[in-house]
Amino acid sequence: MKIDSGSTAWMLTSTALVLLMTPGLAFFYGGMSRAKSVLNMMMMSFVSIAVVGMAWVVYGYSLTFGDGGGLSSFIGGFGDWGLVGLEDAATTGDGTGVPQLVFVAFQATFAIITVALISGAIADRAKFGAWVLFALVWMTLVYVPVAHWVWWSDGDDAGWLFDLGALDFAGGTVVHINAGAAALALVLVLGRRKGWPKEPMRPHNLPFVLLGAGLLWFGWFGFNAGSALSSGATAAVAFVNTLAATCAAAFAWIVVEKLRDGSSTTLGIASGIVAGLVAVTPACAFVTPLGAIGLGLVAGAVCAFAVGLKYRLGYDDSLDVVGVHMVGGIVGALLIGVLATTSVNDAGADGLLTGGGFALLGKQAVAILATLAYSFTVTYLIAKVIDLVMGFRIDADDEAAGIDSTAHAETAYDFGAIRAGIGSGATAAVPAPATKVEARS
């Protein structure tokens, strides 16, 4: 098929937007971390780009979007190993007119950010080398199979969840539920941070959090609308729904905060933005804009309450990957079964409120449960093996001193120079008192 220059330009732009999301995530997570671990937190996102990006080119794409023969319902094959021969592949063959290598790069950015998302759950306490190994193994054994189940199809053959008819336009199951379940397994293996939950562990830089949320929202338009693989009507509805649902979720979160706590916070609105983006991701091309607002309102409110579950259940999810990504992903995936309509996208199905009955809702539930079970179980095993072989957690003294200085021989801020300047009579900025806003960690 002839290359469509407009769609190709949009997909190249979308790929760049989605890649930007991982540095945005680094700012979001880094700001929520304590000052002594911000560099390590950001480094975990950036090294995910390096490790997953290489692995995706060598074998990740082939195993995810290749034909696995007799096992093709569950995993792809090595036919496109190293992307050999794809340099001359004019288009994806799916009628979009987009070169296949553009699709390869676009999907690489999804794999990258999914791995990086998990890191927020284990802030302050994971060995950097163990994280690097985990990122590579997890992408191979968890992300690749789940993405193949949900997104791969080739004529009469398809991944088993795709064949079932479960809908996930841009990654509710593949990215968010997958990462959230993995985060829960990982925190159970590593255990709690020293002092949690008795010791307050506040975000050290709320402007970083807001900057990161803004970059994530900006990039997410490529994440969702780019998943149309063309610059047509489907991309347009995904774009508008990404805006509408996120606005609604951000508003719902700060309303919950106001009613529950007496004040709305910057951390709350930033978290609401992310919750809305997460929830609308699987549904963005299957619901109406009004449906997207309803979905966002539900997701923002539910996630605002869900982040507090860790205190009741006792798991130390440092930056609320479980409460926002796993719970938000589940809300979005389930509400497809309620709100989806073929009037928006005839490639989808009708949900409970649009004349489709419970059929689609049941399929969505199967996809959610399968992803949760597989991701949690395999992640737990991976983390346990790494912990036995090389140790996954830094020692107590290094954790107390701060992982930035002990693991990377760096610190984000030179407080010594500030204090020296004050002592010598020079004018210097004095660090502000700790904010009253406590991290949900």
Image (spheres, rainbow, N blue to C red):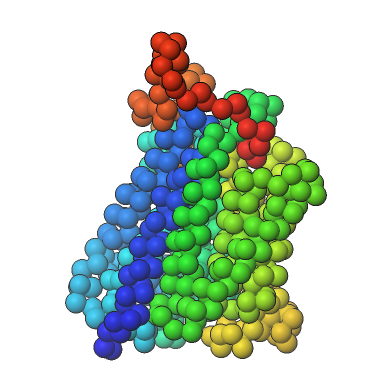
In this view, the residue in front, 162 or 281, is: 281
Q: Is residue 306 left or right of residue 379?
A: right
Residue 427 x %, y %: 43, 20
Residue drawn at x 63%, y 38% is 439
Residue 133 visible within the image: no
Residue 91 x %, y %: 29, 81
Work out whether 34 lies above or below 358: above
Give the tally of numbered discs: 0
Residue drawn at x 47%, y 78% is 235
Work out whether 105 lies above or below 383: below
Looking at the rendered image, the quarter that the N terminus falls into is bottom left
Residue 43, by quadrant, is top left
Residue 409 x %, y %: 35, 25
Residue 19, by quadrant, is bottom left
In this view, the residue in front, 288 or 190, is: 288
Residue drawn at x 43%, y 72% is 226
Work out whether 155 lies above or below 189: below
Looking at the rendered image, the quarter that the C terminus falls into is top right
Residue 33 x %, y %: 53, 36
In this view, the residue in front, 166 or 77, is: 166
Q: Is residue 26 left or right of residue 377?
A: left
Work out whether 225 lies above or below 403: below
Residue drawn at x 32%, y 77% is 8
Q: Is residue 215 left or right of residue 59?
A: right
Residue 110 visible within the image: yes
